[in-house]
Each structure stands twice: as C-alpha cells, then as structure tokens.
Image: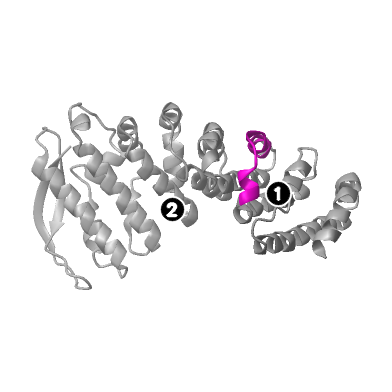
C-alpha cells in the first residue's frame, strides 16, 4: 500500500533525500513530489478510518528544518497546512514547539516560504487552543506585510490577521503602520484589497485606533474604489468599513474629543465638506448585486443617524437620495444633510 511504501521510503529520504534535492535537482524534486503525493493519499485514507492516527503530521513536523532546500521547505510547509485541515485529531495533538518551528520560517529569506509558513499558521488557527498562542507572531506578520510589496504575502498575512483576535499590545504598532496598510487597500490587487478592507473594519471598531484610521492620508481619487466595476465582495466589505467608521464617529467617547484631520485624510475624503461620497452611494444603489445595494442603504442610514444625533460644531455634508426600491433606478436629490462628527 501507499502507507507502507511511504513509511519504508521516508527514513531513506531523511538520510539521503535532502542531499539529492540539493545536488541532483530534478531527481530530488521528483522524490519530494512522490512523497507529497503519497502523503496526500495516506491522509485521505486515514480520514476514512474514524479515529485512526496516521502520524503523517508528526512525520512532516519532524522533517521540517531550516537546512532544507527551498523546494523541500515549500512542499513540506504546504503539506503541513493541508494535514492540519484534514487531520484535526493529529493537529490538536501538536504543541507550542511545533508552532514555533513553523513560525521560524517567517524569517526565511524567500518570500514564498514566508507565505507558506503564514498559511500553515492560519491552518492551526482552526484549532481553538492555538488561537491565542498564534497571536505571539502577529507583530512579525504585520512587519512582513507592510515592509514587503508582495501581493501573495499581503493576502496570506491579512487572512491570518483577520482570523484572530487583535490584542491591545499591537495597537501602537498598527498606528505606526497605518499608512502602509492603507496603501495595500488602494493597491489595485483585488484579493489583497478585500483582505485589507476587512482588517480595517476590525480596526475601526477599536476606539483608540479610530482617529488614526480617519486621519490616514489617502489618494485624492480614493472614492474611485466605490465604482460599480469593483467586485461585489470588495464593495460590500468597503461599505461595511464606511458604516463602522460612521458608527465609531457617533460614539460618545469619540464625540467627547476635539479631533483635527489632515486635508487629504480619509475623514475629509469620506465625510468632509467637499466629499462626493453621496454620489458614490447613489450609484451603488443601482448595482446589480442586491447585497451591495443593501450595504449602500445601511451606510446612508448610518449617516442620517449621525445627522440626527450629533450636535458638535464640526460638520460634513452628505447628499441623500429618494427612497430606493429594489432593481429600480433611484433619482438623485439635491437635498443636503449636515452630519456632525
């Protein structure tokens, strides 16, 4: 069987395979491919037998070390992530030392290896006892995604961040890295943008990060992100982000302070006197996706709530539209609403 053949070849490969992978190129890669394929078959077979511990994940972790060639490290880290998802019982038996081993590859010189290490850590977040422990490496992941312009690294790192509670001790680092995170949101890479705006929505619900987000410098054409040409999931997440910002500005704690904003800050682009956010919202009411329409209505209602409840002297004007009915073209109105933040 594949299991028996795999187990019989594994010690030989441990002794000679890595050297083959470095010295003979194709032959080594073929060996790695064979082992990973046989591992996949073994995992699926193990899953079909309830309660069986195949030991595959333990063997992979025992084999992983920084001295391997890049190809071998990549294949093993990928297989570890897959094994964690498929072999929950074996994954639950892993230890903090196993997490440290995987996380050590965040220091690898190759960005692809870092991505795979992040993906493996993301897989471990599905095991509840590891969620808090993995937070230890969030500062490192934040530094990686804001210091390296690599879309795969951005997506992987932000997916990990979005799946974990955000500890208070990361807030000072987040304040410092906010401009870099905003650049990712405006990058034009759709996958990275979706993950970035999800992360901004999480941060927007943290009271001591709200002003830093709103005061963050953005491109003058930031509102182009609200075009109907954008992907539905991105538009929905972007509108949810704006809704959370609006709600945060309405909170008594935020309104109790006198805040100042830079000219090209996110606040001025979205809520300032010269903002064209209202025009964007009206256009999104005509989006073909119902979820986008609903979320646009939620933002309008949130801004109207700000208008009715706010009493501080700082104002931003937001246009409104007549009542929108599903699949019916709305008619813009010139009515101006004063929304106080």
| Residue located beneath label 1 in the image | 57
Q: The magenta stretch spans which residues?
A: 89-104
Query: Which residue is found at the position 39% from the left and 60% from the top?
Result: 233
226 vs 73, left or right, is left
| Residue located beneath label 2 in the image | 194
Residue 151, image x, y percentages: 55, 49
Quadrant the N terminus occupies? bottom right
Query: Which residue is found at the position 11% from the left and 32% from the top?
Result: 313
Place residue 228 in its image quadrant: bottom left
* Element type at mark 2: helix
Residue 158, image x, y percentages: 49, 45
Q: Main secondary structure of the magenta part?
A: helix
Residue 86, image x, y percentages: 62, 56
> Can residue 143 be spotted in the picture?
no
Binning the other alpha carbons within 10 Å of mark 1 as few (below 14), some (14 to 19) or many (20 upward) gives many
Q: Nearer the viewer, mark 1 or mark 2?
A: 1
Dot placed on the residue nearer the N-terminal end, 1 or 2: 1
- The vertical placement of 272 against 34, above or below, is above
Front residue of 169/226: it is 169
Front residue of 301/184: it is 301
């Amino acid at each position: 069987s594949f299991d028996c053949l795999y187990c019989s070849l594994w010690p030989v490969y441990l002794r000679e395979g890595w050297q083959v992978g470095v010295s003979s190129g194709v032959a080594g890669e073929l060996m790695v491919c064979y082992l990973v394929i046989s591992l996949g078959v073994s995992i699926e077979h193990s899953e079909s037998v309830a309660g069986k511990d195949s030991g595959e994940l333990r063997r992979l972790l025992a084999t992983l070390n920084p001295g391997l060639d890049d190809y071998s490290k990549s294949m093993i880290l990928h297989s570890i992530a897959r094994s964690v998802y498929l072999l929950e019982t074996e994954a639950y038996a892993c230890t903090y030392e196993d997490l440290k081993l995987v996380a050590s590859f965040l220091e690898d010189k190759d960005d692809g290896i870092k991505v795979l290490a992040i993906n493996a850590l993301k897989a471990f977040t599905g095991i509840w006892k590891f969620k808090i422990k993995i937070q230890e490496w969030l500062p490192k992941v934040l530094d990686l995604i804001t210091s390296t312009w690599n879309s795969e690294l951005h997506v992987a790192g932000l997916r990990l961040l979005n799946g974990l509670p955000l500890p208070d001790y990361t807030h000072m680092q987040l304040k410092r890295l906010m401009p870099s995170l905003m650049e990712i949101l405006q990058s034009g890479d759709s996958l990275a943008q979706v993950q970035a705006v999800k992360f901004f929505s999480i941060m927007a619900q943290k009271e001591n990060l709200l002003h830093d987000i709103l005061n963050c410098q953005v491109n003058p054409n930031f509102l182009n992100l609200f075009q109907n040409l954008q992907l539905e999931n991105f538009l929905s997440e972007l509108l949810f982000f704006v809704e959370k910002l609006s709600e945060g500005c309405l909170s008594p704690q935020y309104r109790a302070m006198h805040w100042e904003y830079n000219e090209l800050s996110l606040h001025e682009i979205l809520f300032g006197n010269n903002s064209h956010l209202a025009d964007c919202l009206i256009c999104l009411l005509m989006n073909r996706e119902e979820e986008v329409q609903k979320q646009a209505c939620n933002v309008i209602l949130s801004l109207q709530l700000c208008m009715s409840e706010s009493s501080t002297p700082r104002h931003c004007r937001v246009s409104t539209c007549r009542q929108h009915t599903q699949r019916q073209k709305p008619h813009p109105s010139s009515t101006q609403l004063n929304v106080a933040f």
